[in-house]
Amino acid sequence: MGTAIKGQNLRVSINGKYLCSSTTCSLHISAQLEDSSTKDSTGNWQQQECVGKAWDGSAECLMVMDPTETAACGIDIAALVGEEADITFDITSGAQNRVLSQGLYQGKAIINDFNCDAPNKANSKCSIQFTGNGALEKVTSGAE
């Protein structure tokens, strides 16, 4: 039995920069199916054919003021709404955020939504959503 990957070790990077102070991220991959059943199909079961694939994802983070060379803050991402960006899902080694060689996914996506929530006397948060624009690829090499 393998070791479970903890949520804190999955990170999203946008255009080569980690989303700093990230709290959650998600990746969704789907297949578009078409019913290819015919009169020659047996029984009552449908036969499906994959005619396309799609992917999208989202991330949430705390709003921070001081991004670094390797990290982007949420407000930086707001400027990318409607733009295509390089998106990477990395498996990291925790707080140091070194990319491990267990694999990562990457592709181009359009940032299609940015939302900022700033409640009184609480941390401000932002969320982004993006939709894949082409293939999402699994990359099996990474730097440590």
Image (tube, rainbow, N blue to C red):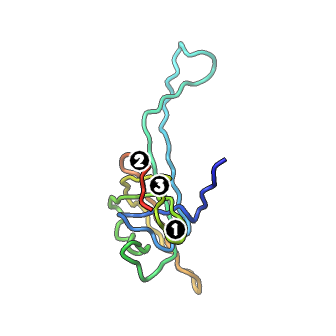
The residue where tag 2 is placed is 137
Residue 15 percent coordinates (x, y): 35, 63
Please identify, in this view, whether the residue under mark 1 or under mark 2 is nearer the observer. Answer: 2
The residue where tag 1 is placed is 60
Which label was assigned to residue 101? 3
Which label was assigned to residue 100? none
Dot 2: element? strand
Residue at 41% from the left image edge and 72% from the top image edge:
71
Using the numbered discs, state the Cα–Cα distance from disc 1 to disc 2 in whole angstroms.
Answer: 23 Å
Q: Nearer the viewer, residue 72 or 54?
A: 72
Using the numbered discs, state the Cα–Cα distance from disc 1 to disc 3 in whole angstroms.
Answer: 25 Å
Residue 139 percent coordinates (x, y): 42, 49
At label 3, the amino acid type is: Ser
Closer to the chain start, of discs 2 and 3, is 3
Q: Quadrant of residue 8?
A: bottom right
> Residue at the bottom extreme?
121
> Residue at the right extreme?
1
**Callout 1 touching callout 2 (CB < 8 Å):** no
Closer to the chain start, of discs 1 and 3, is 1
Q: How many marks?
A: 3
Residue 27 percent coordinates (x, y): 51, 54
Residue 81 percent coordinates (x, y): 37, 65
Please identify, in this view, whether the residue under mark 1 or under mark 3 is nearer the observer. Answer: 3
Looking at the image, residue 70 lies above or below residue 119? above
Residue at 44% from the left image edge and 49% from the top image edge:
140
Please identify, in this view, whether the residue under mark 2 or under mark 3 is nearer the observer. Answer: 3
At label 2, the amino acid type is: Glu
At label 1, the amino acid type is: Glu
